[in-house]
Structures are given as C-alpha cells and as structure tokens.
Image (spheres, helix red, strand yellow):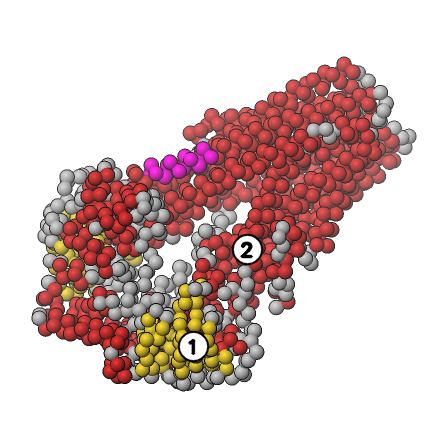
Amino acid sequence: MSDFGFEEEEFTTDFSGQTLWRILGLARPHWRWVLGFLFTIAVVSAVDSILTFITAKIIDDAILANDREALIRWVTLYAGLIFVSAAGVFGFIYLAGILGERIRYDMRRSLFNHLQELSLSYFDRTPVGWIISRVTSDTDRVAELVTWGLLDVTWGILNILTAMIFMVIINWRLALIVFAFLPVIVISAVKFHKRILTEFRLVRKINSKITGAFNESVTGVRVTKALGREEENLREFGGLTSDMFKAGYRAAWLSALFLPVVQLVSSFAIGAVVWFGGLEVLTGAMTIGGIQAFVSYILFMLWPIQEMARVYAEMQRALASGERVFSLMDSVPEISDKPDAFDPGSILGDIKFDHVDFHYKADSPILRDFSLSVERGETIALVGPTGGGKSTIVNLLARFYEPTGGVITIGGEDYTHFSLQAIHSRLGMVLQTPHLFSGTIRDNIRYGYLEADQSEVEQAAKIAGAHDFVVAMEEGYESEVGEGGVLLSVGQKQLISLARAVLADPEIFIMDEATSSVDTLTESLIQRGIEAMMTDRTSFIIAHRLSTIKRADRILVIREGQIAEMGSHLELLRLRGHYYRLYTQQFRRQLEKQYGVFGAPKPTPA
Amino acid sequence: MTELGTDFDLQETLADRRIVGLWRLMRGFRLIFLVATLSIGGAALARAGTYLLLGFYVDQVLVAEDAGRLLPWVALAFLALALAQGGATFLSGRLAAKTAEGIAKRTREYLFDHLQRLHFRYHDKARTGELVQRSTSDVDAIRRFFSDQALGASRIVLLLVVNLAVLINLNLRLALLSVVVVPITVAMSFFLFRRISEAYEAYQEQEATLSNRLQENLSGVRVVKAFARQEYERSKFDVENWEKFTRGRRVLRLHSVYWPLSDILSSFQLLFGLTIGALMAMDGTITIGAYITYAGMIFWIIWPIRNLGRLVVQMSAGLVSYGRVAEIIREQEEPLRLGEYEPTGPPAGEVTFEGVEFEYEAGSPVLRQIDLHVRPGQVIALLGPTGSGKSSLVNLLPRFYEYTGGSLKLDGVELNTYPRSYLRRHIGIVEQEPFLFSRTIRENIAYGAKHEVSQEQIEAAARAAAIHDVILTFSDGYDTLVGERGVTLSGGQKQRIAIARTLLADPQILILDDSTSSVDPETEVLIREALERLMQNRTSFVIAHRIQSLMGADLILVLDRGRVVQRGTHEELLEEGGLYLQIHDAQTRIEVELGKEIAGV
C-alpha cells in the first residue's frame, strides 16, 4: 500500500554532474558487463545501418544492374548479419538487464546494511514510508539510468553516427543538407519531452492527493455517515478529479503530439532529399538506391532521437532519486562506537545518571539535570504522565540516545566508552507494543539468542509463561505469527516477547509495560514472567500495573523531565501527591477489570 | 451533480463478461474512441501513401522530361502526407486520452461516492488498503487499457491490414509471401509473453516481500537494536534481495530469448520478401518504384506485430483490474434520502422501542425484545458487559444498521420511514477514540456543520469542549494540521475536538461513548464537564463504563446478552439488586479496598 502522507518530492532543477558521476560509479564493480552491453549495442546499431545500406545496394547493384550474382552476394551478407544482430540483441538485453538487477541488489543491500547502523533518532524523525521509497522506487530509477538509460543513449548516438557516416558515403552534399535539420529535430525533441515530464509530474502529485483522499474517506467513513457529509465530500473530491482530468489529459495529448511534431520536422528533411536528391539522380551523381537509403536513414533516426529525448528528460528524475539515495547512504549514525571503544565483558554494576540533560530539539529539553543512582540488582519502577520523560530515561540507558549533557556511568565507567555491541548484547527489552517478526513462534523467541536449541526455547517460554498457550496451538512452536504478529493476541505477543528477553538472559532488563488490556489469566502469566526477569538483574520498568509498581525497590514519579517523587510505595502514598493520585486512579481501573465489572475487556488491536 | 459525471450509475454497466462491462463503461465515449481508432487507420494510410509516392517518384518523376519542375511539388506532397499522418496520429492520441481520462474520472468519482454510501456491514468487513488500491491503481490500469493498450493493439492490427491491402494491390503473390511468418510471430509472442508476464509477476511479488521485510525491520528497529541483531537482519534481508535478483534474471532470460528469436524470424521474412521482390523487379513483374514502395511498407507489417503479444497480455491485466473494480461497484449503497416521512424541523427527540430485535447474521440475535420509552431531553444510560448489545442498540438510531424485528419510533413515527440523511443530521455521535481528518483543527471542528460557521462559533464550541486553550498552544492555532503532517493529538484531545464538532452540528439526539480510560485524572474532569454541557436539552444515550458517571441519568438500562435485564434510576436499581447491584458493589468494594490500602499507610 502506498504510504499516504508521503508526497512526490520536488526535483532540483540544476544538473548535478557529481551525482551523475556517482551513479555511474555504481556500475564500476561490474565494468565487464558494462563493456559487454556497450559493445553489443554498438554492434547492433552498426549492423542496423549496414542493413539499410545493403537494401540500397540491392536496388542499385542487383535490380538496376540486373545482376543476379550481386543479388545473391548481398542477400547472403544480409542473412549473415541477421545472426550477428540477433546475437547482439541477446547480448545487450541480457547484459544490461542483469547489470540493472545487480545494481538494484547492490544498492538495496548497502542501504539496508547502512540502515542497521543508523541511530534511533534517525528513525524517529524519518517516516518509514520515506525510507521504503528510497530503497525501492528510487533505487529502481537509478538502476534504470545506469542500464537502459545508458544503453539508449549509446544506441541512439551510435545509430545516428553510423547513419551519418553512410549518408556521407552515399552522397556528402545531400548528407550536409540533412545534417542541417538534425539539430532542429534533436532540440525540439528534448524541449518537448521536458515539457511533457513537467506535466506528468503534476499528474503524479494530484494522484497522490487522490490516493490520500480515498484513504481518508474509507478510514473516516463512519464519521462521514454520522455527520451526513457525503455530498460535501464528493464535491471536494470532484475538484481533485477535475484537476486530475485536466492534468492527465493535457499530459497525454502533449505526449501524443510529440511524435507527429518530430516526424513533421523530419519530413522537411525527406522533402529536401527528394528534391535535391532527385536533381542529383538526374545528373547521375546519385542512385535511386541512394535516395531510398536516405529516406530510410532519416525515418529510422527518429527512434533514437525520441529515445534519447526521453532519457534526457528522465535523467533529472533519476538524478533526484540518486541524490535521495545517496543522502540516505551518507547519513551518519549519531551514536557510534568511539575509536577506542571496548567490551568490558559485563555491564553488571551500579548505574548512575549524573546531571544528565537531554533534548531532541535544542529548544525543548526533555530531561534537565537528571541524576539517579541505581544499585546493581535493584528494580526501578518509572511512573508518571505520558510525555514526562519515562521512555527517554530507558532509551538513554539502552544507549539508543546519548545524553546531551552530563554522563551515564555503568560500574563507574562512562558508558560511551563501551562499544554499542557490548551494551546491546547484554540488554533485555520488552516494549509496550511488542514487535514480532513474521516467522514462527520459535524464530521469534530465538531472536533473543540465535543459537538456542528447542529445549532452551521451551525453557524460556516456560519461565515467561508462554509455553502453555504455545503448545495448545495446532503447530506449537512452529506456528506462524503473521506479519508483525497479527495472528496472535496482544497478550500472547507480550508473552512471546518476554520469552525472547528471558532467552537473551540479559544483565539489564528494561520493560515498558503495555497499557492495553489483556485477560486476567494472561495478565497473571505476564506478571510471573516479569517477576522471574526482575530477580538477579538491574531492572527498569515503565510500570502501569499495581503489582509491578508495588514490587519495585524504588518508584520514581517522572514529570516534566524531572523526578517529582521518589521512594517506596508506602512512602509515596504517604506524601499524598502525584503518586497518590496516579495510584488511586490506577487502582480503580484495575480492580474494575479484575472484578469483571463490565465483563471481558474489549480486545485491543495492536 | 451532473457536472461531476456521477449522473450515470456504473452499476448499470456491470455484466457477466468483463469485456462487456468495459464496453458499457465506455458509454458516452464510444464515438470519440471510434474516431480515435479510425484516425490510426488514417495515419497508416498516409504512411502507405508516403511509400507509394516514393515509388511514383522513382518510376515516373525521375524519368520525366520536366523532372526538375516536378521535384518541388513531389517534395511538397511528401510534406503534405507527413502532415496528414502526423495530424491523424495526434488526433487518435488526443481522442484516446480524452476517452481514457474521462472514463477514469467518472470511475474515480463514482467509486468515491459509492464507498461512502455503502452499508456499514460492508465497511465492517472491508480492508482499507485494498479498497484504496482498487480505487487508485486498478482504475489507473483501466485508464491505460483504453489509452495505451486497446489503441496500441488496434494500431498494430490496422498497420497490418492497411499495408497488406496496399501490397496486395501491388502484387498479390509478393504480398502473401511477405507475411508467411506473421502467424508464427504472433503465436510465439502470445506464448512467450504469457510466460514473461508470469515471471514478471513473480518478480513483483518478490519486490513486495522485500519491502515487507524492510518495513518490518524498520518498525522493529528498537527490537533489532536492543538485541544487537543487525547481522542477523542483514543476512535475512540478503536472502530475499538475492531471490529478487534471481527472479529478475529469469524475466531477463525470457526477454533475451524472445527478442533475438523474433528478430531472426522477422529479419528473414524481410530478407525473403526483399529477395523475391528484387527478382520480380529484375524480370519486370514489378517496377523498381513498386519495389521501393514494397521495401518501405513491409517493415511496418513485420516489426510492430512482435508487440501484439505483449499488448494482449497487458490487456488481460487490465481486465483483471476491471474485475476488481466491478466487485466494489456491485455492492449496494444505502439510500440516504429514501424515506416517506421527512419533517422540516428537527425532531422533538421522543424515542420508543417496542420489541425491537436485531441480528448481524441470521440466527444469532444481538438485541432481543427491547422495549423502551424515552421522552425528549432525557438521558438514558446503557450499562453492561462487552458484547451485551449497548453499541448495537445505539447504532440503530441513525439507521447505521436496520432493526430486524419489532418497532422503533421517533416522535411516534416508525424510524425506517425517515430518510437516513434526516436522522443523521439530527443525531450526533461522540466516540471513544474519534476519527479526525488530516485537515486543520478548524476544518475538523466545522466538519459536520450544515452551514457556514464563523471563527467565533468555532471558538465558542472549542471553549465549551474545553479544548480552546490547548489549540492555542499549537504554533498555528486553529490552522494546525491534524495527523502525520501536523500535530499528533492525544486520545483525550481528539475526544474534545469531536465534542466541539458535535456541538457545532447541534443535533437533537446524542449518542455518547463515555469512556475516559486512557486519560489522566485532570483531563478526565475536563471531558466530563464538556460532555455535560453537550448533553443539555438533548435526548442523550450514554454508553457508560462506571456507575458514578451514570448516577444522574433519567433512566439506566442494564443490558446482558442482548436483553434489557434491569431498568430504572440509580436508586431504584440499587433497591432491586441483580446485575446492577453486583456492578455497584464491585465498585464500592474497590473504593473500600482503596480506602483500606491508603489507611494502612
């Protein structure tokens, strides 16, 4: 599905030689293929011109001279060349095609690999749809340019060149007259195509608006019906489709005009050939076959000119695509290993946030002068309103982000001295909306430890409380979870992601508890799983459930980037402050659910 | 609505055979399209004329005594023919574009309107992505069917017909000998292009797999990083990426077999014809001019025919797209304006249920024997477990669904005699997590208003909904865009904007989903106050989630499995016991426990 909200971007109008050079550079590792298709296309276009020449020779040397021998000679040569040409066609289709596929493969691979390196902040500000279009459609366009674009241009230039050579050979005076028309044909073709491209750009723009309108209309259909907005909506949409009609129609008829116009310009050249060529024939300076060849050359030159105009006009688009692809390739991960980063072997130890500041945007700080010491093995519960900074704290701890001020130390050492791998491989994380990858349940649990065997997977699932529901499924651990885990309920996904974390056996455990409701049984299973995880490791839990909160060694109420209240459950209740209010609200909600006041809670889609 | 092109009901174009459906879809454009097709024939004729003129020029002009005088005229004639050919080509392109764009426009508009008028039952099951895909890409495929493929195929056929006819006139035997391979080429192109399109589909499928893989990686980026699984992800992506390369290679192999093969076939046919023609010219069967004419025209028979298979395969893809669009068109709309009874003013708001029954699917009733009398201005609270029928009951009022039994009256008149448009105009709904459009906040608030509203009215509504102050904190105020390209609003904020929207629409009857589950205590108070302002002087149906929020209701209905199990005011129901008391007790118990817990501190 197209990502609505992503609009066709504007193109830079200036011709970027540097980008073009870099795009061509993509083909360098495969220079043999490039040479191969350039060579074969050269053969094909040369043969094309020779065949036309032979046709003229058949007229002059065979028919007019009534020479059967000559006919046989030329026909045999023609037949031989057919095979040469076919071999050439095979060669360039295959070589250019495979080169294109290979460049697509290469680009996607390096983009994907690069994406794995980029920091979380990059993904926070870049929509997924944008990245996907870079990796798919933009790489396509770039590959098109290096292969078929390059091929068409080479073919076109060579075709025109060889045709020109043969025309000079046949009659240089007439050839000069024809050459006078060439620039006119080429320039009008290119100008025309640019114009057409502008129109098509408009069409695409309106088209993405239409897609957006459909999307919104379908998702908001209930509101439309409830408010009786159908006619008003249709009127608005009618404006869009009218624009689309105008732009589409205009673009289409402009392109329909292109060929006739180029043909018309070229028919002036044909007229000149007929006129002056005829005079030459009368004086004997030219043959009838020569006239025929001239007419054929002029007519066949139209195709390469048309193709080249197309490539030239589309090159801008490909260059813009190239620029976007390269901008993704060139973006530098904001968090990366320092030159002398090391793996301490373990990240067990006291954790300290020392006067930490953090902001995404310089003018809106999230954390200000935040300090916190956590002893090894302690369990910290973070509570507080959305946007208060709870997630930021755990993201900093996981080093998805680094402090913009102050330091975070683990075991007394500034954690930016460690390698990222050292931290991440010893971290266990369970996210609020558990993300599963398509594949089997086993694959997903094993994500925590890729070498785990079946018994280890089962062991982890048992600890997390997932085992029972998994074996109850028809295919057990082999059950497919579907894309993003759609085939499982939210609660089941949480259990699986918990099992994944258990299997990873992390030294630091981070959990963002889900707010969405699950049934009571699953709820208690999750609780048991969390409890199992919390023992023997330092845990940070963004908590929504009372039992989790109460079990924590320390509760932090985070508001506006600062610790508003800190202490044990009882201590905080006594304060009768923020925690008290949060707790009572949470208490009511949770017990309502527990007592089944309103029956089974609604399943919340993930 | 005529100017929008929706005057024509596309349901009438449906047919058992898709090609017939496409033909009917062309209504109003058939003549233009016919002219477009004829124009291609005209262009082909003009081209044939060029070659005939070339032959005439060689045979007659160059040997004439006054050749020098004639030459400019011949040159001019070439120009004239080129002009005719160009004109005809352009005309056909332009008319085909008009047909295709016109049909596409009509189809888009029809689908857009049709989709928003389909029954709730349809939308309950349909998937958004698929509907959007069909309304955009598939419609575009239909457009291409008319503008490129149908016209392209006609062009190839007409080139064959016109040129062959001229050649037959030139010399029958030569003409027939020149096209012996045409059937072979056509058969081969049909056969191979079917294979190619299959291979290409597999390639496209892999492209989809690849971008799914990428999408999954990107949306799971936190998990990937948290488990440091970058290497693993890379190798997984690489497998799919390489598979795509392999499938691409397969498509290429087919192409690189077909084109050289058909090249050889066509070139030999050409050479064969040229040789026969040359021999005929040598023994005087045909003139040298005729030979030159022949040499030019034969090209236009042999070469274009190779593309016929490709076009026909593409056209069948167009048919598939049409089939998908037709599936949507086939669905029935809910008639919005249909209804015998439409009062000029708003309803008083008296609602009577008498033995109302409702089922989504025959045999599994959702509401059973509902009896209820509501006086204008009353507040009715609905309480009960999930699936008890609360939402179904209120959904009957705006006729989102039709009750399947009993009688339901508004102001004493059977509800299903009112037009849906009337009911929806006078019934307002505030959902738990309301949908907002990606427009400005102002437009969202004014979305349901029946007439022009001033900024003052919008602000007044926003104030009453306790959202005005929040809106002012956004940098663009009321002009802030909602959604991806603007601000992301919290559930509570969305709900208050929806309240403002409903206030402006000023309905006589209200349906509220009184849920504040995902908001903090402060916001909860604000929303509750806003809702109370909204309910003043309107008949209101409130789906309640907590006893304390329905104590003020005039009548409380306790629903269970589609039946009203209890009814009365709060006090009456407490007296009565039953489910209500159970719920109440549970909630009281919670308060007691909370009290104990806190007292224990």
**CA distance for labels 2 and 1:** 37 Å
Residue B355's disc is: 1
Residue B425 placement (x, y as % from top left) = 49, 76
Nearer-the-camera pick, A589 or B458: A589
Position of A449 relative to B440 (above/below): above
Chain of the residue under label 1: B
Residue B237 within the magenta-colored segment of the rendering: yes
Position of A520 relative to A304 (above/below): below
Q: Amino acid at mark 2?
A: Glu
The majority secondary structure of the magenta stretch comes to helix
Quadrant of res B46: top right
Residue B291 within the magenta-colored segment of the rendering: no
Q: Secondary structure at mark 1?
A: strand
Crowd around label 1: few <14 · some 14–19 · many ≥20 (10 Å): some
Chain of the residue under label 2: B
Q: Which residue in the structure is indicated by mark 2?
A: B327
Most extreme residue toward the top is: A69
User: Residue visible at 28% across and 77% down?
Assistant: B549
Determine whether, in the image, residue B554 is placed left or right of residue B4: left
Q: What residue span does the magenta drawing correspond to?
A: B234-247
Residue A168 visible in the current orientation: no
Nearer-the-camera pick, A544 or B358: B358
Position of A68 relative to B125 (above/below): above
Residue A67 visible in the current orientation: yes
**Foreground disc of the pair 2, 1:** 1
Determine whether, in the image, residue B334 is placed left or right of residue B430: right
